[in-house]
Image (cartoon, grey):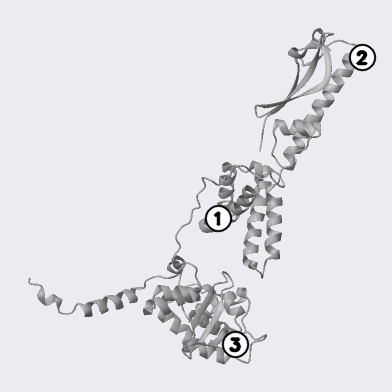
Amino acid sequence: MKSTFNVLYYLKRNAIRKDGRMPIVTRVTVDGIIAQFNTKLEVQQTNWSVKMGKVIGHSSDSKQYNAQLEQIKASLHGIYHELQRKDNYVTAEKVKNEFLGISEHHETLLDLFQKHNEDVLKLVGISKSKGTYQKYERTRRHLENFILLKYQLKDISLKEIKPIFIWDFEVYLMTTGKCQTNTTAKFMQYFKRIILIARNNGLIAIDPFVNYKTHLTKVDRGYLTQENVEKILKKEFVIKRLELVRDIFIFSCFTGLSYIDVKNLTNKEIRTSFDNNLWIMTKRQKTKVDSNILLLDVPKMIIEKYRDKSVNDHVLPILSNQKMNAYLKEIGDLCEIDKELTFHLARHTFATTITLAKGVPIETVSKMLGHTNIRTTQIYARITDSKISNDMQELAGKLQGIEKMFRI
């Protein structure tokens, strides 16, 4: 961040020596804030030019003093520019302390972020997911690019993170970074967590996010209708890879499992429970919350179909998420479905079309999805027109006969 910098010398007149000499004091000013220190040089008042801020006269002492003063000034300028280059956090006191050998270390943002991400990486598979690590890394890279573009620096002191920095970074994400509103909000949340770590560890005194509000827009998460699901179910595929992808997608539509949870599902997690029915009894990879789902006939048939085709005791021979989504687009085109098929759409479909629209209580759906908060389930689920129609027809049946009491 740009700042004003100045160095001047003056005589400390209230510290006059017995021989009439006065100390020469260096005054360093950065952004109007002053820091001072004694040069250890002393001269007679008559030999000092206030206007020029130097010793006057042609004696060897005068020339030597002025040469020393120029060296001090040159050193201070060098320190100031080096501090700006390193972490952009420059104060008059810091320039003074550097010159006097009293170094003041400042933690930098990207350095702390890097250390944090290294710790998260070590916890992947233990208490963190690979996806969480990747999100932190993407946030760090965005910050790295922003700092370089905005300040021409490789890093910045944590003490330089002011509300204006936060605002500028948010604007950068939505413009240069081409991030959507909700994606921007997620990056800002990950950035905020790093600042919170700095605050909790005493690296900064004030939280610059204290008045910052995250801006999220409500997104209507897509889902397939009953008709869409039936189209995909009935479709016959000549290409085996499309048939496999269709089957696994339908499996998720009828179980609500996410891609990673289907990928990790093993045969030992398919169990006969208290009611003598087969259940999926697993923990969600994302939250480590129990997710128990009664197996319906369709997913049972899919499990049986691939019983001898999966490896390492996994239930289904799933492809990579990228390939699954690529092939699902083909399936959507072949089935003439006017929605972009993605694997996560199956989870939304389970919540909306397969369960809630059929009258399954939202508390039950939330438990099967492995949500820790029922509000999360409400985001996934919409009340469909068919559900409203069925509910109102049921209500009409309960009110049948009441119309006879009405007289026109």
Residue 373 horizontal/vertical position (percent): 47, 66
Counting the numbered discs, the total is 3
Asked which quadrant contains residue 106, the reply is top right
| Residue located at (56% from left, 55% from top) | 189
- Above/below status of 320 relative to 47: below
Camera-nearest label, 3 or 1: 1
- Asked whether residue 298 appears in the rendered view, the answer is yes
Depth order, front residue of 234/70: 70
User: Could you classify mark 3 by the number of other residues whose Cα lies within 10 Å: few (under 14), some (14-19), or many (20 or more)?
Assistant: few
Residue 37 horizontal/vertical position (percent): 76, 24
Q: Which residue is mark 2?
A: 60
Q: Any mark on residue 240, and which?
A: 3
| Residue located at (84% from left, 19% from top) | 41
Residue 60 horizontal/vertical position (percent): 92, 14
Q: Quadrant of the N terminus?
A: top right
Lower position in the chain sequence, tag 3 or tag 1: 1
| Residue located at (68% from left, 51% from top) | 144
